[in-house]
Image (cartoon, helix red, strand yellow):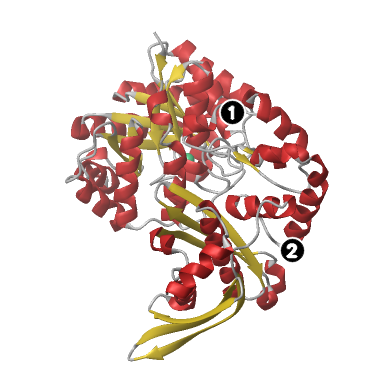
Amino acid sequence: MTRQVEIYDSTLRDGSQGEGVNFSLEDKLRLSQALDDLGVHYIEGGWPGSNPKDAEYFAAMEAIVLDNAVLAAFGSTRRAGKSAAEDENLNKIAAARPGVASIFGKTWDLHVHDALRVTLDENLAMIESSIKFLKDKVGRAFFDAEHFFDGCRENPEYALKCIEAALAGGAERVVLCDTNGGRLVREVAAGVDAVLKRFPDARVGIHCHNDSGLAVANSVEAVMHGADMVQGCVNGFGERTGNADLCAVIPILDLKADIRAIGRENLVKLTNISRFAYELANMPRRGFQPFVGSSAFAHKGGVHVSAMARNSRTYESIDPEVVGNTRRILISELAGRASVLARYPALEAHPDKMKPVLGEVMRLENEGFAFENADASFEMLVKRIIGAFEPAFDLIGFRASTEERDGGSISEASVKIRIGDIELHTVSEGLHGPVGALDLALRKALVHVFPFFDGIRLIDYRVHIVNAQAAANAKVRVVVQSQEGEDTWGTVGVSENILNASCQALVDSFQYLIMRHGGKSAANHRRRLHQA
Ligand SMILES: [Zn+2]
């Protein structure tokens, strides 16, 4: 039978201690539900003793039913010189009514002397009595052995005594922490071995920080040595360089180690939850993030792309779909024939056009164009060069303006286009900004000739700064996604002027729609125009 490892998510607690991460109460509730749906086993919701927002969170969670996860409340061992029952923080944990209490305590003698300033024996008593109190009040208690691996290096006998005290108090899991993120893989392995050798029946967890870039590796190694719980955060959020990234730990266990974490059936949700957490934290995504990053399955080098076209296993360790991500073939100056052919196989029949196509792609990329999300613009570029596409209309000019009126803003746009030898001039007004008004004016002109313009929808509009260092003179790249029926396509425009870039992307989208419907047929257009 496949071994099961529990996933203990700390995004809401340790993760929210990361620089730039700030979750509102509402964010925390939404993320909790998403984590539960992902199939993690524990959600560490917060530290009820540390701030009122966390206490409010636990109160609000009483109304939310979790299907998979147990809610954990975090805290520390009692203060020195007082009983556990008198300790305010421990009582706040109990009052939060979590499914399990997780408290950290010192296991490195250096910290006991210099940070806590109590005797080694008093620290052991603090661990045991705090765990015992929570076990009584909450029903379940875990012990986070803070700085365990540092303690293990300098005073292993004492570090193990701390584990013994936690087990004596009734800790269900002892979670070994590389709190400073400084220990190597072999040291983590030795620490887990030492605990399981001394306490063969103990259930061990692992909690690693990423200060040496080893948090994921150390977590996986601990599991190989018998740990059966991994603590970490979505996207590796957390103090300093963060915690172990669960978006990496989970697929490694489920796909490569033959160990069940959340199960393969849930892995497909991973990329989504990663993006959702960035969204809530209001942080930019990291494209290079393993498994879930936008570049995780993006292929650019020409040799890679040609091999990928034959067999995706050549340059991918897993299928992107398994973790809910997607493969992307990037067109770029690095890529040769193969990337272009992978995106437009019909070019094979025009070997003499390969060079002009690559030249044009490079020229446009230097100007700031990117075709990764603009398949339709790319297709028309290639077709124009091989003579298979001619624009159905020309944009002669446009004007757009916005006026503040009666407390709202109204935008107006006028466009002039030429179809064959006929010029059309239309004006539109709208409440959705100048780009929206431009879109309306263009359609108003085109629908005279091409009735199918009723069926097109713009589903996404994005602006990227191309050369941010140029500040106010920066170029912008506008990428538009359009939809007709089930089909969607992307187009792109680049300019120093955002309206110009938007207009290019819109015109490309509309040219593409016309091409899909059979393209330019001048006689037909004229006939329709004369009827109109
Ligand atoms: Zn931590």
Judged left or right of residue 172, residue 471 is: right
Q: CA distance from mark 2 to mark 1?
A: 41 Å
Q: Earlier in the sequence, mark 2 or mark 1?
A: 1
Q: Quadrant of residue 39?
A: top left
Q: Position of residue 362 (x, y in %)?
A: 78, 54
- The amino acid type found where label 2 is placed reads Glu
The residue depicted at 60 percent of the width and 28 percent of the height is 154
- The reply to whether residue 215 is in sight is yes
Q: Position of residue 164 (x, y in %)?
A: 40, 21
Q: Position of residue 188 (x, y in %)?
A: 57, 24
The residue identified by callout 2 is 367
Q: Residues within 10 Å of mark 1 (few under 14, many from 20)?
A: some
The residue identified by callout 1 is 217
The residue depicted at 52 percent of the width and 58 percent of the height is 514
- The reply to whether residue 51 is in sight is no
Q: Which disc number belongs to residue 200?
A: none
**SS at mark 2 in the image:** helix
Q: Nearer the viewer, residue 10 or 97?
A: 10
Say which quadrant the C terminus sits in. Answer: bottom left
- The amino acid type found where label 1 is placed reads Ala
